[in-house]
Image: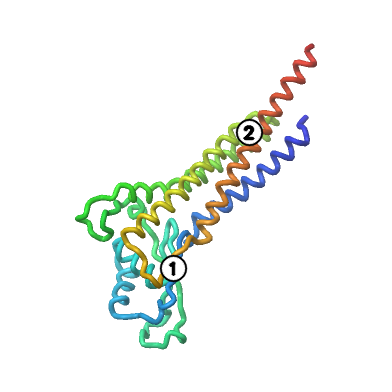
Amino acid sequence: MMDNRFATALVIACVLSLISTIYMAASIGTDFWYEYHNPSSAENITEFSKSILDEFTNGEPDEKTYTDALFRYNGTVGLWRRCITVPKNSHWYSPPEKMDMVRNCISFSLSDQFMEKYLEPGNHNSGSDLNRTYLWRFQFLLPFVSLGLMCFGALIGLCACACHSLYPAIAVGVLHFLAGLCTLGSVSCYVAGVELLHKKLPPPDEVRGEFGWSFCLACVSAPLQFMAAALFIWAARTNRKEFTLLKAYRVA
């Protein structure tokens, strides 16, 4: 029969695991990992900025073009999409205060996720920037690896419940620990990638950039995964030790 301490630890670990999975899934599926705020985005609409907008929405812009658009139009960036806030109507001469603003989002294709980054963004002849290339790939792949490890851990946990055994909880804890490392690695890669991009393409003085709530969800998910892993491993190991001592006592 399971001790109440271990049962409580497992329940808390399962709740933490569920919350972290929801946070991680929401983080992957939303577009607010990084946000740009430009107070004059609707006021300074010129023919040049309109051409940038047209290329952003209708073509396949290079990294420099879509980054400039993000700077100018209060852009947000996720793992899968990039979005800008633009006037709803096509009358660019309308007063800014009367403009209805809407979000226009463009998805990254799978080939975009694995495309090389260049030493000079937008200049294909400048050579590959391996640091930014692999940081981008890892920030995209690691969240999915983390989510997969969590789901695999949940499957093992269900099998453990069916077998009425705590021993598989050690494997569940290890998988949660690895998932936490992947989440932490993804967050670190994203921060490093943004910093390197801004060194090559610094935002204008009036533009303010900050990490968004999607990024915060991923940051919160990592410690929840580590806490769940610690509880799973503690419950399994401690229960096994006490069972071994009790068995030895009965034999004696």
**Is any atom of residue 104 visible in this view?**
no
In the image, residue 61 sits, relative to residue 179, either above or below, namely below
**Residue visible at 31% across and 59% down in the picture:** 200
Q: Which one is in front, 86 or 70?
A: 70
The C terminus, quarter of image: top right
**Residue visible at 46% across and 81% down in the picture:** 100
Q: Quadrant of residue 112?
A: bottom left
Which element type, helix, strand or loop, lies under badge 1?
strand
Left or right: 20, with 85 as reference point: right
Residue 208 bears which disc, if any? 1
Q: Position of residue 88 (x, y in %)?
A: 43, 79
**Residue visible at 35% across and 57% down in the picture:** 197
Quickly name the residue at label 2: 233
* Sequence-first disc among 2 and 1: 1
* Residue at mark 2 to residue at mark 1: CA–CA distance: 43 Å
In the image, residue 215 sits, relative to residue 152, either above or below, namely below
In the image, residue 252 sits, relative to residue 124, either above or below, namely above
Circle 1 crowding by C-alpha within 10 Å: few under 14, some 14–19, many from 20: some
* Tag 2–tag 1 contact (CB < 8 Å): no
Q: Which one is in front, 127 or 30?
A: 127
